[in-house]
Amino acid sequence: MEWANEAYADPMAVDFIPDYASATGKGMRRIGWSDGAGLLITVITVRDDTGRLWGATAFRSNQADHDSYTEDES
């Protein structure tokens, strides 16, 4: 969870709203760097009907997410 929080708080994080892989269109994807993990982490979140943000899952970023993160840095 610490790694996901670090990645989510990355000031250089890249967002996809909605998440391009979301079946419902409600998921949001943020790709950010985690110092603790030493790698990029993809964090998936969902906003409920009250507007509260929930962390759904987090995982090591795949190549497509890596490419999106590095392209955005330029």
Image (spheres, rainbow, N blue to C red):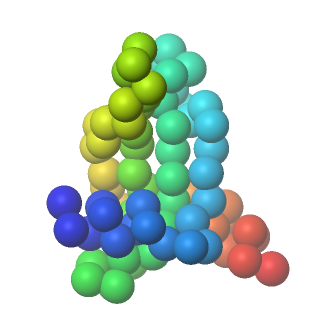
Residue drawn at (51%, 60%) of the image: 31
Q: Tell whether 70 sits left or right of 29.
A: right
Residue in the foreground of this view, choosing between 7 and 61: 7
Please state if 56 lies on the left or on the right of 68 as rendered. Answer: left
The quadrant in which the C terminus is found is: bottom right
- Locate residue 34: give its quadrant: bottom left
Q: To which quarter of the image does residue 41 belong?
A: bottom left
Task: Pick the residue in front: 21 or 73.
Answer: 73
Q: Residue 62 placed where, x, y %?
A: 47, 58
Rendered position, 39 above or below 46: below
All told, the count of numbered labels is 0
Instruction: Determine whether, in the image, residue 15 is placed left or right of residue 58.
Output: right
Pick the residue in front: 66 or 31. 31
The answer, for residue 74, to whether it is visible in the render is yes
Residue lying farthest to the front in this orientation: 50
Whole-percent x, y for residue 14 in the image: 62, 59
Residue 63 visible in the shown view: no
In which quadrant will I find the N terminus?
bottom left
Q: Position of residue 49 (x, y in %)?
A: 41, 14
- What's the residue at 72%, 77% (across, down)? 73
Up-down: is 68 above or below 49? below
Q: Residue at 61%, 73% (x, y): give it.
A: 12
